[in-house]
Amino acid sequence: MTKNYIHTYLIPVPKSKLKQYRSMAKVAARTWMKSGALAYAEYEADFIPKGKVTSFPMSVKLKAGETILLGMVTCKSKAHCKKVMDLVMKDEALGKAWDSVQFDGMRMIYGGFKTFLEA
């Protein structure tokens, strides 16, 4: 089995801005893939119960009229992911697309994960 590295993020997006976000995400997908990522995917929350102590909505301080998107970028390793991300962060087209979407990036949660178990 392969032991990939995953860069992932949660981001709250106003439902009224999903069309604009999808356009930006298409640019992001092309940018990540041409920069060397193995895979790129984004998912919209479908079942995110409110918790009393912790929850996805609490983690991003979800507001009325927003949804949560989960993004996942698959790379070969942490080192590979860093190289890919360095290229992605320099991409001007993605920067412009990102700036065109209005949402609160301060509530974005992100991180990298190494493989713990695969089945």
Image (cartoon, rainbow, N blue to C red):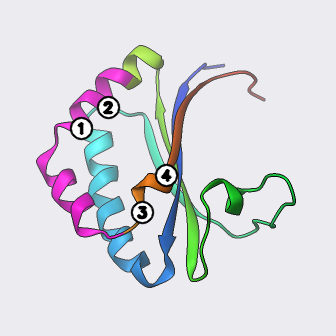
- Measure the alpha-carbon separation of dots 2 and 1: 6 Å
Q: Which residue is mark 2?
A: 85
In this picture, residue 114 sits left or right of residue 96: right
In this picture, residue 53 sits left or right of residue 85: right
Amino acid beneath label 2: Met
| Residue at (31% x, 28% y) in the render | 84
Element type where label 1 sits in the image: helix
Q: Which residue is mark 1?
A: 89
Element type where label 2 sits in the image: helix
Region of the chain picked out in magenta, as a range: 82-102
Q: Which mark is residue 108?
A: 4
Element type where label 3 sits in the image: loop
Instruction: Examine the structure image and report whether residue 87 is included in the region drawn in magenta.
Output: yes
- Marks 4/1 in contact by CB < 8 Å: the verdict is no
x and y, in percent, of residue 52 in the image: 87, 60
x and y, in percent, of residue 53 in the image: 85, 53
